[in-house]
Amino acid sequence: MKTGLFFGSFNPVHIGHLIIANYMATFTDLKEVWLMVSPHNPLKLKSGLANMYDRLEMAKLATENAPQIKVSDIEFKLPQPSYTIDTLTYLKEKYPEKEFALIMGADNLTSLKKWKNYEVLLANHE
């Protein structure tokens, strides 16, 4: 079972996020998509960032009628700042039966080379 991981601040979650997540869950080989609400992207400013629990709740409300889309607070429980590579390592240990694929918006794609261990991400994940 392949799960798509859509990382983001979701500040706020909007129709564009939902279209991407729903499209990926419906028209690709992904069984489900997890919205991975990030407490804070280390490459972005905290100013203007809504409370992480408020963003989590907004994402849950926005997806309550989309059973193929789950909302995750896993990064809330990991050391801060949260890095995608560390979250993926944790998820692989916690869910060894799952295969994960990364989903990202264009805003994150442009800064990918600044991410922690981005080469490992590209080499080991879809």
Image (tube, helix red, strand yellow):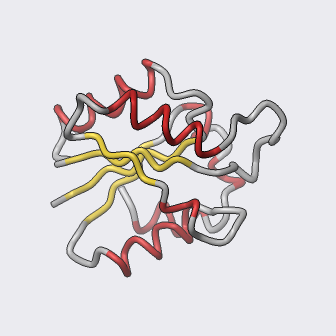
Quarter holding the N terminus?
bottom left
Residue at the image point whose x is 64% and y is 51% from the top: 39
Could you tell me residue 61's position as x and y percent? 39, 30
Residue 62 drawn above or below residue 46: above
User: Is 89 on the left or on the right of 5, as rendered?
Assistant: right
Of residues 116 and 123, the one nearer the viewer is 116
User: Is 36 on the left or on the right of 100, as rendered?
Assistant: right
User: Is 125 on the left or on the right of 75, as rendered?
Assistant: left
Quarter holding the C terminus?
bottom left
Could you tell me residue 26's position as x and y percent? 17, 33
Total marks in image:
0
Could you tell me residue 23's position as x and y percent? 26, 28
Could you tell me residue 78's position as x and y percent? 59, 70
Residue 116 drawn above or below residue 25: below
Residue at the image point whose x is 73% and y is 35% from the top: 49
Of residues 120 and 97, the one nearer the viewer is 97
Which quadrant of the view contains residue 51?
Answer: top right
Residue sitting farthest toward the top: 15
Which quadrant of the view contains residue 20?
Answer: top left
Of residues 41 and 124, the one nearer the viewer is 41
Residue at the image point whose x is 24% and y is 68% from the top: 98
User: Is 57 on the left or on the right of 49, as rendered?
Assistant: left
